[in-house]
């Protein structure tokens, strides 16, 4: 995950983003060369509306949430904000220690996914002539 900081608007020392240096370091240290636009190509970038049936969950306690999808894009590209959650908490096994906002987020995610599965089978039945 490429990172950079300016040392003024954040708590880190200045670190400019330079893909060529980043790629050289990855090749040297891990033996792989990253693809510069991979995430944009893989996940749609500005064309994300061409996709459907995705739940974007973000925990308000997670610093990564600032770069996440925090508002619904369409009816089937939906954002679930978790007030008392952090990185992937909603994707972990349930625990009696889970805050209510995580339980609510999981239920909402299940509701969306269940609805999309139901819609799929309804459309399939229509096309199959059932």
Image: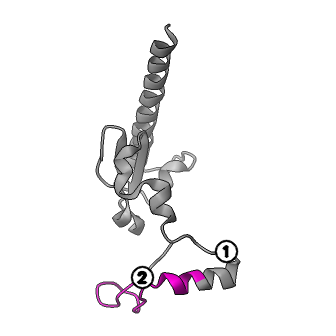
Residue 95 coordinates in the image, percent (x, y): 54, 47
Mark 1 near mark 2, Cβ–Cβ under 8 Å?
no
Q: Residue at x 54, y 45 (%)?
A: 94
Residue 110 seen anywhere in this rendered image of the structure: yes
Q: Nearer the viewer, mark 1 or mark 2?
A: 1
Mark number displayed over residue 101: none
- Magenta range is 4-23
C-alpha separation, residue under disc 1 versus residue under disc 2: 20 Å
> What is the quadrant of residue 78 in the picture?
top left
**Is residue 101 magenta-colored?**
no
Q: Residue at x 35, y 90 (%)?
A: 7
Prevalent SS, magenta region = loop
Look at the picture and state if 71 lies above or below 11. Answer: above
Secondary structure under tag 1 reads loop
Q: Which is more toward the observer, 78 or 10?
A: 78
Secondary structure under tag 2 reads loop
Q: Which residue is mark 1?
A: 32
Q: Identify the residue at the far top of this view.
A: 130
Residue 121 coordinates in the image, percent (x, y): 49, 20
Q: Which is more toward the observer, 130 or 115?
A: 130
Q: Count of labels shown? A: 2
92 left or right, relative to 110: right
Q: Which residue is mark 2?
A: 4
Residue 53 coordinates in the image, percent (x, y): 43, 39
Look at the picture and state if 25 lies above or below 67. Answer: below
């Amino acid at each position: 995950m490429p990172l950079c900081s300016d040392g003024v608007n954040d708590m880190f020392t200045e670190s400019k983003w330079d893909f060529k240096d980043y790629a050289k370091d990855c090749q040297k240290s891990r033996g792989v060369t990253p693809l510069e636009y991979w995430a944009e190509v893989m996940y749609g970038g500005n064309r994300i509306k061409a996709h459907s049936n995705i739940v974007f969950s973000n925990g308000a306690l997670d610093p990564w949430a600032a770069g996440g999808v925090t508002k619904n894009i369409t009816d089937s590209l939906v954002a679930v904000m978790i007030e008392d959650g952090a990185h992937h908490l909603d994707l972990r096994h349930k625990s009696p220690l889970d805050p209510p906002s995580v339980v609510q987020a999981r239920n909402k995610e299940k509701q969306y996914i269940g609805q999309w599965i139901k819609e799929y089978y309804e459309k399939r039945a229509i096309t199959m002539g059932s």
